[in-house]
Amino acid sequence: MDPIRNPYNPGAGARPPALVGRDEELQSFDVAVQRLGMGRHDRSILLSGLRGVGKTVLLQEFGRIAQGHQWVHRHVEATEGFDLTKEMALLARDAILRLSPGKRLAGNTRRALAVLRAFQVRWDLPEAGGVVAEVDPLLGWADSGRLDNDLGDLFAELGQLARDHQRGVLFTIDEMQCLDKDRLGALITALHRVSQIQLPLIVVGAGLPSLLALVGEARSYAERLFAFRTINSLIREEAIAALAVPSRQEGAEWQPEALDAAIEATKGYPYFLQEIGKHTWELAPGPDRITAEDVEIALPLATERLDSGFFRVRVDRTTSAERDYLKAMASLGPGPHSTGDVASVLHKTTPQVNQFRDALIKRGLCYSPRHGHIDFTVPMFADFISRRLR
Ligand SMILES: Nc1ncnc2c1ncn2[C@@H]1O[C@H](COP(=O)(O)OP(=O)(O)OP(=O)(O)O)[C@@H](O)[C@H]1O
Ligand SMILES: [Mg+2]
């Protein structure tokens, strides 16, 4: 069918043509923004889930909602070695300037910039912009040398500035599992402070399932500070809508058997749904219906795209010992698996292979759902390994 009108959108953070199954998350976020805007209390949010389920897409959607309420939204993606201190100073700078366009150095804006300047000087951060450099640091604010305290000062200042302008600030942090425990702890303490004084500033973090344990270890009270949301693959009706709604809007109907075949193959995994939607649309003669045969023809291509792109990049940088570990996991069928069982497949003891397990966790390919267990962070990864890594 017409490739120009193909609605499906596979890709990291690519906005799906129909964002289904996330109404609850969207609605509670909208409520939180409005409550905070009124000076009521609400919580920052942590989204956790496997690769390709739609965490980044949700963060962006939250950003749109916040902007719809005149909030400032800034987004950052953590990577290994992420410098939280520097990144927060940059986000704060943007937020201050965006909260007060046109009258940048007036009154409360000047004060917020002076606190930011103190933070920059104390934390030895490279000058983030001419406007901030022109301001003298406000002594005694954000300059104690304790990150939790100084970030807290900075956030409180930002929250107050936002409130003065009847607006708010949303920071979204993607791949949050990359933060080290100390910095994560400081961030949590700083957020705790703004949340106590009910200022309109929240952070929404997203990351792999390992994020939850990490946050709990960093600060025990984090459990009460954040609303935790697990983002999963879509259930059947949602997966049907994810495929059927976008094509209906383009005047084409998926036949029920076509939907059955696509849902069986993808198991409701959002990334795969977009991929199969895209290839089926491309190959289907149409003009106004998609049949089970179209899906059957498209499936090998969609799988190939998944294998050579999404899956392949994840294993490309692994060592051969790490791959052996992955293969051993895959040979055990659907996870999670006890690390002892994986070691047995390799004819080794658990301590002998722990370093490979740890390296795979560090690469974000695996995670430990509970003590002594391991699973893939990518849905359907076991199938890929059995298909491709022999
Ligand atoms: N609710 C949804 N309905 C349909 N498709 C979706 C939905 N959410 C995400 N997708 C699609 O899934 C794909 C992956 O989304 P996204 O990049 O947000 O996932 P992610 O969880 O951030 O993955 P990663 O952990 O690899 O960063 C995109 O192509 C997106 O369009
Ligand atoms: Mg993502």
Image (tube, rainbow, N blue to C red):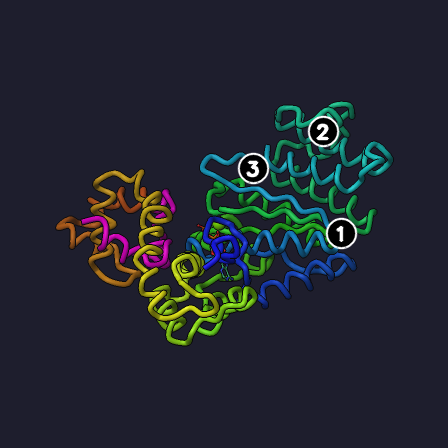
Q: In the image shown, does 210 or 27 lie closer to the viewer?
A: 27
Q: Residue at x 33, y 58 (%)?
A: 380
Q: Quadrant of the N terminus?
A: bottom left
Q: Do the numbered discs 3 and 2 sit on residues whose CB atoms are within 8 Å?
A: no
Looking at the image, is mark 3 or mark 2 earlier in the sequence?
3
Left or right of 387, for residue 307 = right
Amino acid type of disc 1?
Gln
Q: Secondary structure at mark 1?
A: loop
- Picture layout, residue 125 above or below residue 3: above
Q: Which mark is residue 296?
A: none
Q: Secondary structure at mark 2?
A: helix
Q: Residue at x 46, y 66 (%)?
A: 287
Q: Which mark is residue 70?
A: 1
- Cβ of mark 1 under 8 Å from ligand 1: the answer is no
Residue at the right extreme of this rendering: 107
Gap in angstroms between the C-alphas marked 3 and 1: 26 Å
Mark 3 surroundings: few (<14), some (14-19) or many (≥20) residues within 10 A: some
Q: Over which residues does the magenta segment extend?
A: 361-390
Left or right of 134, for residue 9 = left
Please state which of the two labelled residues, at mark 3 or mark 1, is closer to the viewer: 1
Amino acid type of disc 3?
Leu
Looking at the image, is mark 3 or mark 1 earlier in the sequence?
1
Gap in angstroms between the C-alphas marked 2 and 1: 26 Å
Q: Residue at x 53, y 50 (%)?
A: 219
Q: Which residue is mark 3?
A: 84
Q: Residue at x 54, y 59 (%)?
A: 17
Q: Percent from the top left, x then y, of residue 164?
A: 83, 47
- Cβ of mark 3 under 8 Å from ligand 2: the answer is no
Q: Which residue is mark 2?
A: 117
Whether 386 is among the magenta residues is yes
Gap in angstroms between the C-alphas marked 3 and 2: 16 Å
- Cβ of mark 2 under 8 Å from ligand 2: the answer is no
